[in-house]
Amino acid sequence: MTVRESIENKDIALIDILDVILDKGVAIKGDLIISIAGVDLVYLDLRVLISSVETLVQHKNGTRKEINSEKLDKEREELIHATGQPDKWAQQD
Amino acid sequence: MSDLLYLYGLIPTTEANDQSLPSITGFDGESELYTIPVGDVTAIVCNLDSGKHTEVELKDKIENDMEWLQEKAFHHHETVLMVSKMYTIVPLKFCTLYKSEDSLKSSIEGTRNKLESTFKKLKGNEEWNVKIFCNDNQLREEVSDSNPAIEEKRKEISELPKGRQFFEKKKIDQLIDQELENEKNRICEEVHEKLKEKALEGNVKKNWGKDVTGRKENMAWNSVFLIAVDQVDDFIEEVNRYKEELEKTGWSFEASGPWPPYHFSSFS
């Protein structure tokens, strides 16, 4: 196998592909305009996509924490307690 | 109803006439690719069901369905790559869709002149990507030990009264960081210029962060080159020479390609 072939046969990372097909490549306007907010993000910071993959994987593995309003309320109380700040969200008379 | 056209890329009609497109499966996994000649330019397309593919749905999938995006991104890339090995291709952006053949034709006709000059530029050439990574810690030590500016600063400090030495030593760390960046850029620029000699064009891209690359080392340089096919071996050899030469000092080089000419066919 030549040096060239060994490079050609290497696996290409998804991120390399997304970088070119979402951001580069000729844009001759199609009829359907898929304006992806993510494209700029992908270009500026591909992290966004990577982290969404991770969230997806975590979600699948069932490690994602359940969120409900009770838990949020409890966390808020704890924060208020920890910071000693008055509760801005408490109803004011 | 298969009433949308997914456009993968554009090739010169003369080349399309010389050899026919092999059987390639389209975007939905069922349809087949085919060609639509529009004068000197030939479009590589497949049909797509407009009922299943709307702007809103596609946008949502791209942003929220990573599994779908991965599958379709690979499909788009592999298809364009396969076509690029047979013909001179101007690759289109992911999910470029038309509602009718007429609309596709008029879009292409509007860019005919630009396409012609782009085909000329791309014919017989390949796009390659070179990324340079650097183990900053290793290089930092070397810079710290051997940089003349830092050496001089150290000497200066050693002549100061003890009390002031402490603060000046802190400043020296900043100086080392700065010199490290200078050194990294100097080496990368030098390599880039050398590689450019083997290429027709060379562009510098944005570096990606570690969380994107998943590597321990920092990306120090990200670049793309347009290279004549018969120069590619020389180019890769040159990259490998740098790889061997600079490996010991914490550098690594990664060349990938050939890519469809995504970076060298865009026109605005």
Image (tube, rainbow, N blue to C red):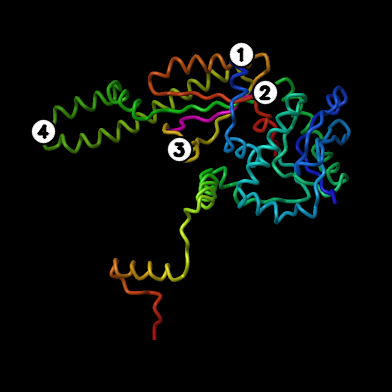
Mark 3 or mark 2, earlier in chain: 2
| Three-letter amino acid code of the residue under disc 1 | Thr
For label 3, the SS is: helix
* Viewer-nearest of discs 4 and 2: 2
* Magenta stretch bounds: B218-226
Q: What residue is disc 4 on? A: B161
- Specify the farthest residue to the left: B162
* Viewer-nearest of discs 4 and 1: 1
Image point 65% across, 46% down: which residue?
A: B68
Badge number at residue B210? 3
Q: What residue is disc 1 on? A: A2
Identify the subunit bearing mark 3.
Answer: B
| Three-letter amino acid code of the residue under disc 2 | Glu
Residue B153 x %, y %: 23, 27
* Viewer-nearest of discs 2 and 1: 1
Have a look at marks 2 and 1 and say if they share a chain: no
* Viewer-nearest of discs 3 and 1: 1
Q: In this view, does A45 lie to the left or right of B41?
A: left
Q: How far apart are marks 3 and 2 (CA)?
A: 28 Å
Q: Is residue A53 left or right of residue A23?
A: left
Q: How far apart are marks 4 and 3 (CA)?
A: 42 Å
Q: Do the residues labelled 4 and 3 touch (CB within 8 Å)?
A: no
Examine the residues drawn in magenta and state their main secondary structure.
Answer: strand
- Specify the farthest residue to the bottom: A93
Q: Looking at the rendering, which quadrant does residue B89 occupy?
A: top right
